[in-house]
Every structure is written in structure tokens, then in C-alpha cells.
Amino acid sequence: MSDRRVRVVYIAGASRSGSTLLAMLLGTSPGCVSLGEVRHVWRRGVEQDQLCGCGEPFSSCPFWSEVGDRAFGGWDLARARRMLALQSRVDRFRRLPQLALLRVASRRRALVDEYLETTSRIYYAAAAISGSSTVIDSSKSASFAMLLGRMQSVDALILHLIRDSRAVAHSWTRRRAMPEVTDREEYMATFGPFKAAAMWAGSNAALDVIDRTSTVPSVRLRYEELVRGSPGQLRALAGALGLDEGAVSALAGPEVHVSVQHTVAGNPARFTQGGIVLRPDEEWRASMPSRDRRAVEMLTWPLLARYGYHLRG
């Protein structure tokens, strides 16, 4: 790996919170490269050869081919299967209690360090090939956010992205095609309001604890304020990333130009190129059944209130 330290900006939060959009916006900033959800590179990229955000299959994408060559001498299924096995042991939400006890679990600590060292090779290779000093990883996983403090080879920052739980739950009910899968018709997973609310609450509660206890600095952001160009949120983002005023005003919209980005996994919006109009997706206000809304509010109201969301209106 290079002697120059790479900065990793890790977007964490509940799924369907706008992480793909935030990663795309940050990927337009000087010195930044967005990789999408790096934790999925092994299954969706190496194993399944799904489409990169540039529109090419992972195996045919020049950028990812160079990353693999530089990091490992090329991508191979044996390493992918090893990393997927490690991922199931150390990078799952259900593993959080075990990860919190790493100080006394030496065998698991060795697995964690192998997993992190291999991931850091991807970060360094991507930074070198793109000529960037900052890598954006929108994997969202709370378990990986907890582990970041052990990745001594990078300078990490956690962006804890929060979106209204009702909007997130409504998004989980939508049936959306996955354009990255080309050999068959496949759709993103869907869940009912109770499961979606439980996942939202669990993810954000875990990240609240990590925000307070991790050695990695973190910044809490609200999706709705970001896409509206809230000066306070943009200042917080700029300060955390060390961006100048020009870069911040470019993120404020109302339209942001996005060029080709080599991203793995995420919302289908990652295939968008050209102008993106920033506006909050609040379809839930008109379309979400009232019983579903009440169920989500019942399960998530303590955190909704903590994050400044109104329960009515």
C-alpha cells in the first residue's frame, strides 16, 4: 500500500435513507471518489458480475479491473469466498455484541483484522487509481462502523445519515427493479412496516452508541435537510470533509451535475448521469396508509423525537 494515508468517509445508517444519493454528491467533490457499497464488492461484483455504476459488468469495468490488479494482483473467486465467509463472522448486525467484546476474543480479533486489512487494500488501490485522497464508502453497516476504529491504516470519518422512519418504511414497500442484474429480472427486497421500522430503529440506535463511544469521528446528517440545501447541514459536512465554500455551494443544488461513477450496489439512481434535481422524496405523506404510519410511529417515536422529526404534520 502507498505511504500516503487515505481518508475513508463511511456513510452509515438504515437502508433506504438516501446513502446512494449522498455518496453520488460527495463523489463530485474535488479529491473524492465514490465506490458505492464496498462490502458488496465480493458477492455482487466478483461473484455475480453485476453492473458497475458506469454501466459495464464488474469484470469488464476498467476502473475495478485496475483496482483488483493493484490491490491483489487481480480479482479471484477464492478470495471473494474467503471475504464472504469473514463477512458473515464479523460484519453482520447480529454480531455487534461479539464485536464489542473484541478485547477478550482474540480469535475473532484475528478474523476482524484480516477482513479490515483486505478491505483497506481496496480503499488504497481505488484512491491511487483515481488520484483521490478521499474514498466514499456507502455500505451503511453499523457493524463495519464499529470496526472502523481498528483500521489503523486509514483516516476514517463516519457520516451517520438519518431519514424519517416513515419515509424509510414506505420506501421498503416499493417494488423496484435492479438494473445491475442483467441475466434475469430481479427486484429489490420489500418489507412490511413493522420489520422496516424495527430495522430503522435498531440501526440508528446502534449508530448512536457508536457515535458516542468510537474513536472514529462522526457527523450526524439528516437526509431531508441535505437535499433542501440546509446551510447548517452543509457547513457540518464541509467542516468534516475539509471542503471549501465552492464545493459546498455545488452540493446545495437545486441541481447537481454527476458524471460517471464506478459504484457497486445501492439504489438504481447510481446509474444516473448528468443533472440531478435535489428534492426530498416525501411520497409517504400522501401515499402511506394511516395504519402503517401509526405502526411505524409507535415503534420509532423515541428516536424520531430525538432526531427532531414531528410525529404529526
Image: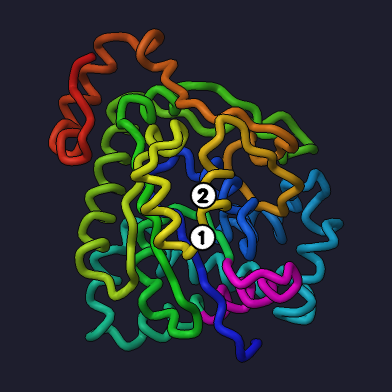
Q: Residue at (55%, 41%) from the top-left corner?
A: 21
Which amino acid, by three-letter code, is at mark 1?
Answer: Leu
Vertical order, 155 against 136 (above or below): below
Q: Nearer the viewer, residue 119 or 238?
A: 238
Q: Position of residue 93 (x, y in %)?
A: 34, 56
Magenta-colored stretch includes residue 296: no
Q: Residue at (61%, 91%) from the top-left corner?
A: 3
In magenta, the rendered stretch is 117-134
Do labels 2 and 1 touch, CB within 8 Å? yes
Q: Earlier in the sequence, mark 2 or mark 1?
A: 1
Q: Nearer the viewer, residue 233 or 64?
A: 233
Q: Which residue is mark 2?
A: 248
Classified by dominant secondary structure, the portion drawn in magenta counts as helix
Q: Position of residue 175 (x, y in %)?
A: 55, 22
**Secondary structure under the numbered disc 1 in the rendered image:** loop
Label 2 vs label 1: CA separation?
Answer: 7 Å
Q: Nearer the viewer, residue 138 or 118?
A: 138
Q: Residue at (36%, 83%) from the top-left corner?
A: 109
**Horizontally, is 233 left or right of 118 in the view?**
left
Q: Residues within 10 Å of mark 2 (few under 14, many from 20)?
A: many
Q: Which residue is mark 1?
A: 243
**Secondary structure under the numbered disc 2 in the rendered image:** helix
